Image (cartoon, rainbow, N blue to C red):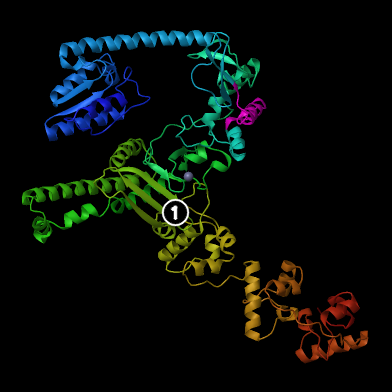
Amino acid sequence: MHECREAIDADPLRRFVAEYSDERFSAYRRDRGPELRDATQHAEDLAAEHGIAELWSQHSDRLARGDGRNARHTVEIALWALKHDVRVRTLQDPETFRDLLYTVVTGQRNNEDSKRKAISSQAGRKRAIARGEFVAHLPDGYKLHREIDQSGQLRRRMVLDPDRQELIELLFRLALRGRTCGRIARTLNDKGWLVKPVRRIDRARPFDVGKVYELLRNPRYAALSVYHGEILARGHWPAYVSERQYERLCRQLANPREGFSKGPLDTYLLTRLGRCGRCGYPLRIATGRARLDGTRPRGYVCASLRSYRGKAQCQSSPFDAHIAEAMVIASLPALLGEESCDSVASSPDTGGPAAEQGSDADTHPYKTLALHTAHSQRRARELADVRRMGCWIDRESDGRTEATRSEASELNRLLRSWFATLAIDVCEATVEITATRLHASQPPSTAVTIDRAAWSRFAPPGHRQLAPANAWSAAEMIGALKAWADQHACSPRRIQWKAASPAHPSSLTVCSHFGDWNRALRKAGLPPVARSPRQPWSDKEIIGALRAWAKQHGRVPAYLDWARGAREHACAQTVWLRFGSWTAALRAAELTPPPRLKCTARRWTHAEVIAALHQWAAEHGRPPKRLDWIRSAPEHPTAQSVRNYFGSWGAALEAAGLEA
Ligand SMILES: [Zn+2]
């Protein structure tokens, strides 16, 4: 490179333009790398612009050393240069590109040289491996120790890397205890270890199942020297596990876990397209175990949840595939962008192109017209395809068939021709879909936000909840409540939702989430319903009733005020049982219990009680019931006092000669 620059700068007639270099890309096994491609392209452009351009290189074998079949032959460079008026200059063999015949000969020799070198270096590698020396890349947990031996040659030796030793020892210790690769990956990630990057520029990633498997299967950790999978010798480096332990691990890893099987291969609409909106990892498909009717639950799950374990996993949760696909299809017109809509709208008669024509004199009117027609045709094709997807998802909602399954892969290809990625982020109340277009001419990305409550309201029953398990989100429950109200023109009653159905969750689910039924209705913007008298009072309802009573009466209710239950409040006994005591219930409702009154009770004798009973019976025309005397009055004691004197209410009436 340096020599080329000097040679060019020495000549006043030449001007240096740009410099390209490919590292790590073979000219023998393949056609070098992207830099050579860029360099040839640049040279072509320069030749087209200035009539002549030169491509300089140190030696012809820098450009190509292939045999013409697997990799580029030198003569191909010469022919390319001839076609595009580019001159190729090589410093060390300047004759090569002067004559085409000469190029063929040199190219052949370059290829032969490389082939011979490759064969001899391979044989050398094999011999070194058989001697148990370090060859090829360094496994994680080791580092290289360089030293000069007696004969003055540089020797490289693998020694334990103190920084990574703890990690590799932990890995093998867990594996020898019979832990699965997933469990090991979780432990390593939780302890904060990362995979050692292969190249320095790579980002350090967390451990996944595959990486743990790869490390455990590497025989070099047992100090075995391997050539193309074949163990040739014992290596001269310290081992992490013994050979017997290594063999045991291999046997262990070869046996798959009991009952573990991958589901059948199935086509999903967002395969190779879906991304997790939270972390950007690809979405993996998840086909669950077959249900009794033979169908399988289908879902999407973030790849980080599948591959990684422990803290490295992202916080998103799996979601139902059918609903996610329906959401994507519903938002396709918006995701495809308004740009093509505009071009249809500004058709020639609206004056859109005429204005453009004025500003841009180069544009021929017919050219603009053709462009617009092309745009609108493309838009029409896209819209037709979107309609087709709508029909497909409709048929899918009745269950998958062979026909819809095969169409899914076709539609997947279609989507992948429009978008590079489709990121889906499932939030508490919304679902955000962000699409990245494939072609640079289109707007780079568009996003659509779907309200989960609205989706749940208008989606058909059975397709309302995004979580694959029977877990309704608050937004979806509100949507289901609204959907019921739309259909029946009234708020649902609790009893009507006693059992869950595909259209709605059970009333218990709603109440446990919102606290009480009417609160859920209020959140959904629906009028509350009267509670049925047979329905048990929830703690929140009791507290609400206590507060309402206190507000209405201007004082805190006493136990005896609530002795009988009413429509507005539970009976005191229920409150007492639920909260442990009346005072505790008042405190839970943030009301101040009234101060205890000084005891002013009078003592009644048996005869006085009997007389009071007779008098009450004479006044009311019937003997008193226990609840009639629940509070004391000047003319009679409380029912509890009567029970204390006579043992029971019935015994008191009997003593008074009255009928119960
Ligand atoms: Zn994620």
Q: Residue at x 21, y 9 (%)?
A: 105
Secondary element type, mark 1? loop
Q: Is residue 537 in sight in this rendering?
A: no
Q: State whether residue 205 is above or below residue 637.
A: above
In this view, the residue in front, 542 or 216, is 216
Q: Position of residue 80 (x, y in %)?
A: 17, 23
Q: Position of residue 595 (x, y in %)?
A: 79, 82
Q: State whether residue 278 is above or below residue 551.
A: above
Which residues make up the magenta segment? 159-181
In this view, the residue in front, 523 or 653, is 523
Q: Label 1 is placed on what type of residue?
A: Arg
Q: Is residue 449 in sight in this rendering?
A: yes
Q: Which residue is mark 1?
A: 464
Q: Locate residue 202 relative to residue 508 in the image: left or right.
A: left
Q: State whether residue 249 is above or below residue 203.
A: above
Q: Residue at x 47, y 14 (%)?
A: 228
Q: Position of residue 77 (x, y in %)?
A: 21, 21
Q: Residues within 10 Å of mark 1 (few under 14, many from 20)?
A: many
